[in-house]
Image (tube, grey):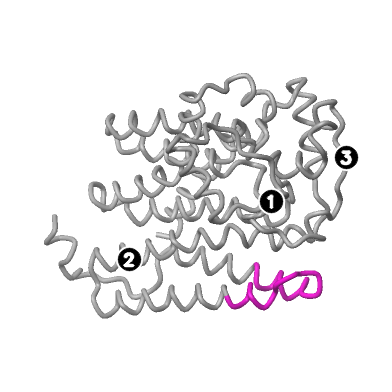
Amino acid sequence: MIKKIFAVEKKSRKGLMAVEWIMLAYTIFTTLFILVTWVRLAHPVDMLWFRAQSVILTLALWGVYRLYPSRLTTLFRVIGQLLLLSWWYPDTYELNRIFPNLDHLFAGYEQSLFGFQPALTFCQTFSHPIFSELMAMGYVSYYLLFVGIVFFYFFCRYEHFERTAFIVVGSFFLFYLIFDFLPVAGPQFYFKAAGVGQIAQGIFPNIGDYFNTIEFDVHNRDFILPIPGWEDGMMYKLLIMAHDAGERPTAAFPSSHVGVATIVMWLAWETKNRKVLFTCLPFAVLLFFSTFYIQAHYAIDAIAGLFFGTVFYFFLKWGYKLSS
């Protein structure tokens, strides 16, 4: 296995990988959007500089591969795109906050469907430390799920590795494309801005361009509800670390956490490996419920994540086959 990873590929690929092309397509589209909306954006120069850096990194990793075409340098190219996702996510906030916030509509849909706000009542009803830790573990496991399935395919199903990377990374960009134009911040931000008292009474005020009038700071707890959980729990501490690393009042609908976890489950099913499937399944289930337990999402966001994740999986699978 080690020899295969380091061995030079006899039939090297001269061009970019599909996973790199989809990043470049998203970069070009959002760059044009930035130029059109320049005067309305808070940090357009920084946003363009990040895009330039992303392109430079992608081309540099491609150059390394051209010098030494192997499975290892192919893996480096995919890892580069996975790492960039953590920077692309906060970027959606910079784009969508120029539009009027829509949380009052989604909170209203939630109330109409359930008769209450699951993001408020779920964590209050089930507040035992063990349950809270399970929910925190479910949310944190999101990162292990999609990175884990990519690495599994690299080591155990290499013939489908590039396609898997394309499906996983491509799904993120499809979600980000939605988030760019759908300004829904989620309960943890909207409930704080609107007032929990009003929300509990079924009143959902329209906060308009509130998020575009503030300079959001992830470390300033004045902008966010306290995250439910057992404060002494290890998983809760990991959750806070992940949250503080890059959370923004954006990307609530549909839940990309649930959507990507759904895609991971489809990819796990494809492996025909029961150990992989049943290892991922409990984490995916916990993740689904944890999204609105910790008040990051409305319950309808999680439900929509199942739908969009499945649609994106089959769409990207078809797209990769067409491009091959």
Quadrant of image for the N terminus? bottom left
Q: Amino acid at mark 2?
A: Phe
Residue shown at 63% from the left, 24% from the top: 122
Residue shown at 48% from the left, 67% from the top: 21
Mark 2 or mark 3, which is nearer the start of the sequence?
2
- CB within 8 Å, label 2 to label 1: no
* Label 2 crowd bin: few (<14), some (14–19), many (20+), radius 10 Å: some
Query: How many angstroms separate mark 3 from mark 1 (CA)?
Result: 17 Å
In which quarter of the view is residue 309 placed?
A: top right
> Is 319 in front, or is 167?
167
Seen in the picture, residue 7 relative to 229 is either above or below; the reply is: below
Residue 173 percent location from the top left of the image: 56, 56
In which quarter of the view is residue 20 placed?
A: bottom left
Res 249 label: 1
Res 76 label: 2
Residue 213 percent location from the top left of the image: 82, 60
Q: Which residues are magenta?
A: 30-49
> Is 14 in front, or is 222?
222
Residue holding disc 3: 205
Closer to viewer: mark 2 or mark 1 = 1
Task: Verify whether residue 218 appears in magenta.
Answer: no
Q: Amino acid at mark 1?
A: Pro
Query: How many angstroms separate mark 3 from mark 2 (CA)?
Result: 47 Å
Q: Main secondary structure of the magenta part?
A: helix
SS at mark 2 in the image = helix
Residue shown at 33% from the left, 75% from the top: 14
- CB within 8 Å, label 3 to label 1: no
Q: Amino acid at mark 3?
A: Pro
Seen in the picture, residue 131 relative to 151 is either above or below; the reply is: above
Report how many numbered discs are placed on residues in the image.
3
